[in-house]
Amino acid sequence: MSVTVDIMREDWADPDIALPDYATAGAAGADLRANFEAGRRDAGLTLAPMARALVPTGLRVAIPEGYEMQVRPRSGLALKHGVTLVNSPGTIDADYRGPLGVILINLGDESFRIGHGDRIAQAVIAPVAQARFDVVDALPDTDRGAGGFGSTGVG
């Protein structure tokens, strides 16, 4: 299934930075890249341990109605450096038209530098269903019932 996402660069964004793209034919997520304003491109951004920052992509998007863009961590950054997303997955709603930024956090022991053009997250386009919430007097029984937080076993 293919969905078209309209994309626009910010006026200040570096047009040489690649648009979101899929690294392989079977990839579920399209890579998002850091795109810093002209005065910060050489320096990038350094995240100290336990620090977080909103990293700009230089993009705005229009997600089709009935879909969302999920912004997810890159597994290599998480494993090798402890860099992940604070709100994972982040959600870009179909009606949002503001700047697309990625909230990164460094959970590692060493500072981590994010360079201009670095792949910082991945975007997954997913269908969305809006629910109707009805107040009821009782919920139907299930085998599991109210068991949670490990109630189904270990592993």
Image (cartoon, helix red, strand yellow):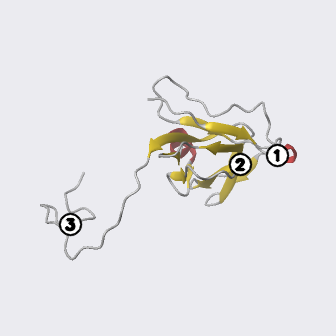
Q: Nearer the viewer, residue 46 or 36?
A: 36
For marks 3 and 2, the one nearer the N-term is 2
Q: Which residue is mark 1?
A: 37
Q: Position of residue 149 (x, y in %)?
A: 28, 64
138 left or right of 10 in image: left
Around disc 3, counting alpha carbons within 10 Å, would you say few (fewer than 14), some (14 to 19), or many (20 or more)? few
**127 to 49, vertically: above or below:** above
SS class, disc 1:
loop
Quadrant (top left/top right/bottom left/bottom right) for the N terminus:
top left
21 left or right of 9 in image: left
Q: Which residue is mark 2?
A: 56
- Residue 147 got which mark? 3
Q: CA distance from mark 3 to mark 2?
A: 41 Å
Verify CB contact (< 8 Å) between mark 2 and mark 1. Answer: yes
Q: CA distance from mark 3 to mark 1?
A: 50 Å
Q: Tell me the kind of residue under disc 2.
A: Pro
Q: Position of residue 113 (x, y in %)?
A: 70, 46
SS class, disc 3:
loop
Q: Tell me the kind of residue under disc 3.
A: Gly
Q: Single out the residue that lies furthest toward the top.
A: 25
Q: Tell me the kind of residue under disc 1.
A: Glu
